Amino acid sequence: MDFNGLSIDQAPPISAPLRFFLAAPLFALFAGFLILFSDSGALMSRYSMESIVVTHAITIGFFGFVMLGALTQMLPVLAGAKISNVKFATKYSHLLLFFGLIFMLMGLLQNNTLFSSIAVVSLGSGFMMILIPIAVAIKSVTNFTPTVKSMANSITFAFLTVFMGLFLLYSYSTNNISELHATIANIHSVLGIFGFAGILIIGVSFQVLPMFYVAPKFKTFCKKRVVWLIPAGLILWVMLNIFNDTYALVAKLWITLFFWAFATTVWKKLNKRRRPISDVTVWYWRSASIFLTLGAFLWIFDEYFKHEYIVMVGILIGGGFIMSIVTGMLYKVVPFLVWFHLNAMGYIQIPTMNEMINKNLAKLQFILFIASLIGFIFSFYEPLLLEISAVCFIISVAILEFNIVAPVLIYMKIKKTEPDFDMKAFATKES
Amino acid sequence: MSTIKEFLSSDHGKCDELFATMEEKATKSLKDAKKACEEFIKESERHFQMEERIMFLEFETKTGMTQGPTAMMRHEHSQMRSLMEQMKEAVEAGNKDKFFGLSETLMILNQQHNMKEEQMLYPMAQQHLSADSDRIVSMMESMIVE
């Protein structure tokens, strides 16, 4: 049995997750500005370059960065698994992903094949540098709980999504678009959203909802089945999509059904939670639940309308579901990490978690974010709404970055002072 | 009789319930929460001592690991004790913001601590101490808090 997660000096340094968390809103900010200055017509097609760039600024830049950063932190606690050489892996993968993504976004926007080629190498090596150590760490886990299983599934889908993404980007860099391009792009997006992000969120929520809100635990039956029923649905969908598209809807219904059930379960669990607090993180879980339900049904509905609504589905599920959850969790995780690491270093006089982030600013951020999502959806009918929604989104993301930077600044400021206690005596290397 | 793992895990649940009751009362008025706060701290202290004075000692003697996981768990207990002290002071001072700030921090610290124990340390302890499981559980049940 691995006890590495139990020792503070073997837990990841605070810089491991924070470097990812701090960079994530910058890409969302870029996406916001691109929406603001793009033609609304271009954004209505999922295959326009603007749409592809906005999507990847959010999916790789925001979701990917936060989730990879969070995984380095969650694995020791939720799975007792330690990522080897975590400092090296996070530092260099972060650098490669950060610049790789910038090259990718610029390469696609300007049709610059050199930039796209650099991005293929940089993103490919960046993803491998972090995904492989995560996969190896998961493999070492002996207590394979449903959460660990979902992490393993999620990482498997992450590999598939990355490989397909690299192939697609390589096609752009060589200006050689294959016949299968659209099919692969479709599979790539579904596996990334539902397979990597969706399954990870579900698996983590098994632990997080009872843990943060004292909500009733998920039924063992649900936990055990869901971790393989969703991947099975996704694999079936991929197969049907390639070999027999006519019946792909069956698998789509299968996947949708479980995600909708999850959304409903989250809502019900929150209603039954024992903790009375209703902070912005609870609001984010609730908004995620609503948007996921709407997005899941629209994904099915879209099938009958020649995929006219697919971008709207992307906004509902990507923005409304995943971005809501990820943002909400940042509000919990960042101040806790700051408190935890400072306390472990012997500081006692630390602001409480609630004092690190201004509650009113967090609420304003939430309201602007939700307003921007609703605006984006209705901009399909009223294009004038697009600009104002983009402005709301930009301000909301800027506030989010500020709300993450604030606790980090507190950390840096306190760290410069002398600790209240000398904690060196507690430093244990044994495992 | 329940195993060490079952016994201590269910005790975590009991403390969580008391924590939730305390917060529920504190939402209405901090004054009303005083008793619930004391009760939560008392039960948590009892839990810490059952581990530190009985189970951890048995585990350390059996495995020879004195600077490993149990040392880390003791350290986290001391972090939680310090937060509980500060919470008590916040209740006395009637400072609701401070109280909820501390309770939020304690909640997450406590939960991640419990998770490490329930998923790693307790199964390990159960494995090493299975022959003495009944004796250890009954010692923990009858322990008098110092």
Image: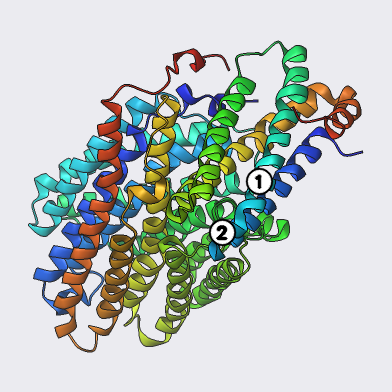
Residue visible at 66% across and 53% down in the picture: B36
Provide the secondary structure element on which disc 2 rests: helix
How crowded pointer 2 is (Cα within 10 Å; few <14, some 14-19, many 20+) is rated as many
Up-down: is A37 above or below A150?
below
**Residue A72 sits in which quadrant?**
top left
Residue visible at 65% across and 25% down in the picture: A1
Nearer to the camera, B97 or A162: B97
Work out whether disc 2 and disc 1 sit on a shared chain: yes
Residue visible at 37% across and 87% down in the picture: A305
How crowded pointer 1 is (Cα within 10 Å; few <14, some 14-19, many 20+) is rated as some
In the picture of the structure, the residue carrying the numbered disc 2 is B26
Badge number at residue B38:
1
Rendered location of residue A249, percent (x, y): 51, 76
The reply to whether callout 2 and callout 1 are in contact (CB within 8 Å) is no
Visible residue check, residue A49: no
Provide the secondary structure element on which disc 1 rests: helix
Visible residue check, residue A295: yes
Q: Residue furthest top?
A: B64
Up-down: is A419 above or below B46?
above
Q: Is residue B6 toward the left or the right of residue A41 in the image?
A: right
Name which residue type carries label 1: Glu
Rendered location of residue A359, percent (x, y): 34, 59
The residues bearing labels 2 and 1 have C-alpha atoms spaced at a distance of: 12 Å
Q: Earlier in the sequence, mark 2 or mark 1?
A: 2
Name which residue type carries label 2: Ala
Rendered location of residue A17, percent (x, y): 36, 38
Q: To which chain does the residue with label 1 belong? A: B
